[in-house]
């Protein structure tokens, strides 16, 4: 089975490491989750505080209501702004980039934030976010140094249809989507409409156009360079 996401996504609370990564010539993206730190700046840095639980979830945590916390966080990760941000993360992972999520304190005894985010990303997107401890003093941390720290991140390919659905029409075209989409799974109605808009199947009948899309998917899996003539008027 061809892997879809080949990059890595890792939590770190090591600011010195992150500052060093800003200046590395490597396929690295840094998302700053610290709401108060504005020193972390660079071309490969984005402010990622939107990924943190909303204030309502933090209030539920303070009240000791874990069930309400989970419900609020789950609903929050279904909102449009978050979904767009997640699409960007998954696209970067698809292109083999390493993403560091900087958060100033990864101690699970201090806050439920990181454990809750780890659990949600695994459950909702099949992505296990790695955890990088602080780098010991005196170690060369240039990008690519092997065995400096355990990443322990992984992407469950059983979720590949979810990743592909998120990337279609945003960072992935119809041909790549149909080549990679699991043959045993049905394409959703929203994705089918996006495919219609891009490929313009030739029939007036919806069901025939659906068959056309599935047939093209089969052909692409055997011969990825397959192209079709557009029928748009």
Image (tube, rainbow, N blue to C red):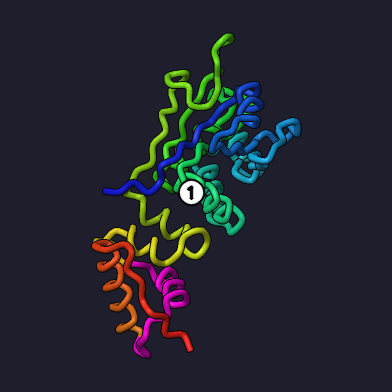
In the figure, residue 187 lies in which quadrant?
bottom left
Q: Nearer the viewer, residue 76 or 128?
A: 128
Q: Residue at x 47, y 18 (%)?
A: 148
- List x then y, in percent, for residue 142: 55, 23
**Residue topped by disc 1:** 90
- List x then y, in percent, for residue 123: 41, 44
- List x then y, in percent, for residue 143: 53, 26
Q: Residue at x 60, y 36 (%)?
A: 30
- List x then y, in percent, for residue 208: 30, 84
Q: Residue at x 35, y 88 (%)?
A: 203
Residue 189 drawn in magenta:
yes
Image position of 44 (left or right of 66): right
Residue 127, relative to residue 78: is it above or below? above
How many numbered marks does the figure carry? 1
Could you classify mark 1 by the number of other residues whose Cα lies within 10 Å: few (under 14), some (14-19), or many (20 or more)? many
Q: Nearer the viewer, residue 122 or 45?
A: 45
Residue 203 drawn in magenta:
yes
Residue 35, relative to residue 146: is it above or below? below
Q: Residue at x 52, y 53 (%)?
A: 87
Q: Nearer the viewer, residue 153 or 58?
A: 153
Q: Residue furthest top?
A: 138
Element at badge 1?
Answer: helix
In the figure, residue 103 lies in which quadrant?
top right
Highlighted range, magenta: 187-205
Q: Nearer the viewer, residue 60 or 110?
A: 110
Image position of 130 (left or right of 72): left
Residue 35, relative to residue 124: is it above or below? above
């Amino acid at each position: 089975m061809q892997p879809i996401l080949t990059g890595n996504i890792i939590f770190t609370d090591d600011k010195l490491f992150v500052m060093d990564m800003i200046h590395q010539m490597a396929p690295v993206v840094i998302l700053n989750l610290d709401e108060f730190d504005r020193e972390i700046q660079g071309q490969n840095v984005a402010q990622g505080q939107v990924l943190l639980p909303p204030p309502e979830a933090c209030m539920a945590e303070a009240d000791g209501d874990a069930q309400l916390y989970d419900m609020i966080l789950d609903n929050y990760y279904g909102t449009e702004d978050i979904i767009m941000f997640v699409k960007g993360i998954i696209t970067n992972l698809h292109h083999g980039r390493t993403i560091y999520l900087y958060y100033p304190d990864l101690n699970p005894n201090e806050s439920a934030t990181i454990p809750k985010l780890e659990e949600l990303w695994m459950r909702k997107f099949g992505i296990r976010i790695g955890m990088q401890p602080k780098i010991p003093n005196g170690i060369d941390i240039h990008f690519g140094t092997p065995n400096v720290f355990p990443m322990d991140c992984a992407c469950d390919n059983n979720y590949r249809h979810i990743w592909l659905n998120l990337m279609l029409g945003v960072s992935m075209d119809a041909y790549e989507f149909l080549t990679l989409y699991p043959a045993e799974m049905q394409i959703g109605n929203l994705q089918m409409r996006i495919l219609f808009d891009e490929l313009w199947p030739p029939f007036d009948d919806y069901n025939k156009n659906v068959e056309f899309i599935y047939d093209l998917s089969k052909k692409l899996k055997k011969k990825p360079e397959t192209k079709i003539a557009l029928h748009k008027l």
